[in-house]
Image (spheres, helix red, strand yellow):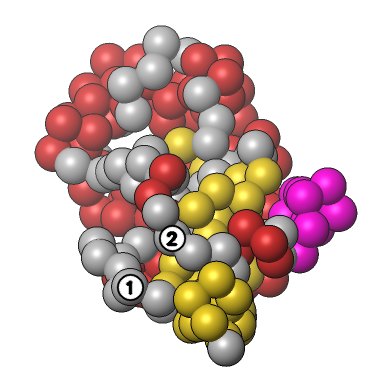
Amino acid sequence: MKISSKREFHAVVGSLRSLLADDGVSIKTTRTQELLSQSLGYKSANGLLASLPVDIELNDAVFRNFDDRLRSNHAVLSVDAASLLRSLEAAHRSYSTVWNSDSRCYPQKLSKNENYWYLTEHGWIPWSQMDFAKMRVELNIYKVVQSHFAPFLDDDSFTGSVWPIWTADIASDDFESQATKLEKDFGEMPDKAQMFSRLK
């Protein structure tokens, strides 16, 4: 479950409050923010917000933390933490997750005449310079394009083509807005001279 902005965090918290209310549990917004953040291993909601963007992995430790805090801080014994948090995850599952973007956007190996390019806060970055353990679409990658190139006339000139693999219009409104800003700053596509130069 990816949270890329403060607005998305508040949306997740709002959904969590609604799910708790469905189970007969009423908790104020600020306390729900702390409940979620601390269950995920942060000291506070401010700590989580300072760490954005984050890619949250729900596991047994998170379920236990959530359950323990419900019991100790809110005297709630009747909620199935795992079921509730899985419902929260399903409500905020991104289209890119359903689309299986990982296998499409982060190939483990490239062919001789292809490359992948990623639009980030720091501009367009080629596949060879990416750390995919930390970089994800709809988290801190805003666009992915694939390029192919081949010799043209002689070995010192090249021709090629490029097309998008993933774009932010299938993400949240906030994420799409930031992607538009980055495209204005760095271009809708990588620099052609760089994109179609011979790979070293």
Foreground of the two, 134 or 156: 156
| Badge 2 or badge 1: first in the primary sequence | 1
- Residue 48 horizontal/vertical position (percent): 50, 23
| Contact between labelled residues 1 and 2, with CB atoms less than 8 Å apart | yes
Q: Amino acid at mark 2?
A: Leu
The residue located at (83%, 47%) in the rendering is 185
The residue located at (79%, 58%) in the rendering is 187
Q: Specify whether 195 is left or right of 107.
A: right
Does any portion of residue 55 appear in the rendered image? Answer: no
Quarter of the image for the C terminus: give it: bottom left
Q: CA distance from mark 2 to mark 1?
A: 8 Å
Foreground of the two, 163 or 99: 163
Residue that badge 2 annotates: 199
Q: Residue 179: which quarter of the image?
A: bottom right
| Relative vertical location of residue 124 with respect to residue 110 in this rendering, above or below | above
Local secondary structure at mark 1? loop
Residue 85 shown in magenta: no
